[in-house]
Amino acid sequence: MPTSFDAVLRSAIEDRGLSLARLHHRLHERGLEVSIASLSNWQCGRCRPEPARSLAALTALEQILGLPHDGLTGLLGPRRPRGRWVRRGHAVARALDKVLAEIAADIAPREPQLRWRTVGERVDVRPDRTEGATRTQIVFEAMADGVDRHIALHHNESGAVPDLRSVSHCRVGRTRVDRDDAVYAVELVFDHALRRGETYVLEYEFGHVSGPPATTYQRWFRYPTRDFLLQVEFDRGAVPATCHQVWSPESGGPSRDVRRLWPSHWQTVHVAEQNVVPGGHGIRWEW
């Protein structure tokens, strides 16, 4: 009895006596566009659909082919790792920990006492498809008296070394840069020590002079956060073919697709989340 995804799909198609063209038409009737070539590749094992991106199509296939619920989707397993982050993810995670330890050894215990209430980020992608400026605004709430700084970290997944362009409502303290893994850490000092329950707003901007084409942006949250808004704006002449919201539960691990995103008339995609859990939250795109 077949147990792999491609073997089960191939066997079910043969049992139903459906051609791939007919199967394509049946999916089209349900508003699902899956090419005949993709169906052929799926049943031959040359590639497989990613769970989040093709879940609706797979559920429809299970119904059309008379398979039980999860008869196909249950055979996919986790999304296949891919991309530069997967190849170098753990090295980058170690680099992040290293620069954070170097810059914040004496203040790290204070970090959990600073609650992130709102985070807003806007990323610009230039005409040459490289990451341009990333502007961040954070609203903090002090969980104890005396908190007076935050450590901002920035990493470019394409390997371009970031630089700090500007800060607002704070001053720059110590900085550390790991050029091998394109990691930048900066100490942002508030204008006064906060009282418990007091909120504080600061802004900063990272940028890149040049680099290879960008394919993703993720914000790593170490602690729960109430609200997160991420916007990625592409140049009119460099709009990607597809965009997806992504999430990674593990630092340095592969991310998985959450849902498909479509660029607006202004070439912008965004993710707006509430009650954000620790992990990597972001957007990936394919050219």
Image (spheres, rainbow, N blue to C red):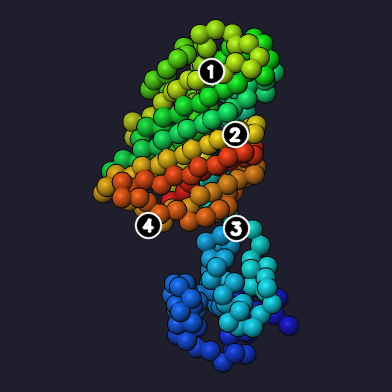
Provide residue 100's location: percent of width, then percent of height: 60, 23
* Distance between mark 4 and mark 3 Cα atoms: 20 Å
Q: Quadrant of residue 249?
A: top right
In the displayed structure, 100 sits above or below 221; it is above
Residue 194's place in the image compared with 68, above or below, is: above
Q: Quadrant of the N terminus?
A: bottom right
Relative horizontal placement of residue 277, taking residue 35 as reference (left or right): right
Residue 178 appears anywhere in the view: no
Secondary structure type for disc 2: strand
Residue highlighted by disc 1 = 200
Amino acid beneath label 2:
Arg
Report the residue marked by disc 3.
79
Q: Percent x, y for residue 82?
A: 54, 53
Q: Is residue 46 left or right of residue 73?
A: left
Q: Are marks 4 and 3 in contact (CB under 8 Å)?
A: no
Sequence-wise, which precedes: disc 2 or disc 4?
A: 2
At x 60% / y 11%, what residue is drawn? 194
3D distance between C-alphas at marks 2 and 4: 31 Å
